[in-house]
Image: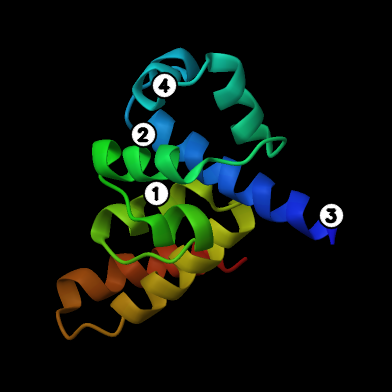
Amino acid sequence: MQNKDHVYNRNIGKRVRSVRMMNNLTQENLGDLLGITAQAVQKIEAGENMLTVSSLIILCEKLNVTPDYILFDRANTERDMELSFETMEGNQKLHLLLRLLMYMSKVDNEKYRGPLEAIIDLLDK
């Protein structure tokens, strides 16, 4: 169970880091906002420590993100979706972009369909 907890903590830490970076904050800045040290933020981002409930609430309120995104990677808002994309690994991003482009290539407007199909062909190689 401890190993599973570490995986959860690491994933939460990645999302905390993403939120911090998307808001152009240093670990020290985020620590000041949450009332903790920069070292504590570093340990949270590394998955070594867990956010407290009060830190989670402050983080969500001040940085405009939902607890569902931080804890479970569930995008409930446009901001959550943007942050979720930022934490995806390279292959996940490419797969999502390919699916999106394939969906978009079904548009009726020929002006857009040709360029989208060309991009899809390049990515699908």
Residue 66 screen position, x and y as percent: 33, 55
State which tag comes first along the sequence, 1 or 2. Answer: 2
Q: In the picture shown, does residue 94 fall above or below 31?
A: below
Q: In the picture shown, does residue 16 fall above or below 20?
A: below
- Please name the residue that numbered disc 1 is placed on: 83
State which tag comes first along the sequence, 1 or 3. Answer: 3
- Please name the residue that numbered disc 4 is placed on: 35
Which mark, by number, is residue 64?
none
**Is disc 2 placed on a helix, strand or loop?**
helix
Q: Residue at x 33, y 68 (%)?
A: 116
Looking at the rendered structure, the kind of residue marked 3 is Gln
- Kindly report the distance in space between the C-alpha atoms of the residues bearing marks 1 and 4: 23 Å
**Is disc 1 placed on a helix, strand or loop?**
helix
Mark 4 burial class by Cα count in 10 Å: few <14, some 14-19, many 20+:
few
Q: Residue at x 61, y 34 (%)?
A: 44
Q: Comparing marks 2 and 3, which lies closer to the viewer?
A: 3
Looking at the rendered structure, the kind of residue marked 2 is Met
- Please name the residue that numbered disc 2 is placed on: 22
Mark 1 burial class by Cα count in 10 Å: few <14, some 14-19, many 20+:
many
Q: Nearer the viewer, residue 101 or 44?
A: 44
State which tag comes first along the sequence, 2 or 4. Answer: 2
